[in-house]
Image (cartoon, rainbow, N blue to C red):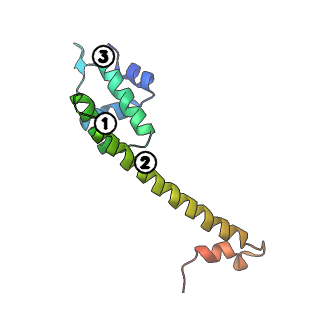
Amino acid sequence: MRSIGALGKATNTKVETIRYYERIGLLAPPQRTDGNYRTYDDEALARLSFIRRSRDLGFSLDQVRALLSLTDQGTQDCKTVDRIARDHMAEIERKIADLIALRHELSTMIESCCGGSISDCRIIEALSPFD
């Protein structure tokens, strides 16, 4: 058994985040000591590690909740997990495409700058609202 601080340290998770995950149901309510301190077992450590890894990979809380639910069931095939992962990958690909377009637009603005005064700056002009 470990304290909330030890659990946080073991998973690199802030104590407030652990409490939040408990409030929203991603982590089960922990056992309590006689002094009413939270205590966590190895199962809680494994579950929080799963949550952290999923969040590090960019899965939303709803996606993490779905993945945990499927993990808890354990008997289904992994088609649903595959679909969640593929949907997430598609979202990442959309974000990458947006970032590439943003980089191109910003590069174009930077290249158009002649290094004159602010009143003639093409970057400021491009960022200003149109009349």
Q: Secondary structure at mark 2?
A: helix
**Residue under numbered circle 1:** 20
Q: Secondary structure at mark 1?
A: helix
Identify the image quadrant of residue 105.
bottom right
Looking at numbered disc 2 in the image, what kind of residue is underneath it? Met
Tell me where residue 47 appears, x and y as whole percent: 32, 26
User: What is the C-alpha distance between the residues marked 1 and 3?
Assistant: 18 Å
The residue nearer to you, when weighing 86 against 91, is: 86
| Quarter that holds the N terminus | top left
At label 3, counting other C-alpha atoms closer than 10 Å, the crowd grade (few under 14, some 14-19, many 20 or more) is few
Q: Say which label, 2 or 1, has the lower sequence index.
A: 1
The residue lying at 36 percent from left, 34 percent from top is 17
Is residue 131 among the parts visible in the rendering? yes
Q: Which of the labelled discs sits on residue 7, or is there none?
A: none
Q: Say which label, 2 or 3, has the lower sequence index.
A: 3
Q: Which of the labelled discs sits on residue 89, or is there none?
A: 2
Identify the image quadrant of residue 8.
top left
Question: Is 86 located above or below residue 109 in the figure?
Answer: above
Residue 29 placement, left or right of 44: left
Q: Nearer the viewer, mark 2 or mark 1?
A: 2
Question: Is 25 located above or below residue 63 in the figure?
Answer: above
The residue lying at 22 percent from left, 28 percent from top is 75
Q: Which of the labelled discs sits on residue 41, or is there none?
A: 3
Tell me where residue 100 appears, x and y as whole percent: 57, 59
Question: Is 39 located above or below residue 65 in the figure?
Answer: above
User: What is the C-alpha distance between the residues marked 2 and 3?
Assistant: 33 Å
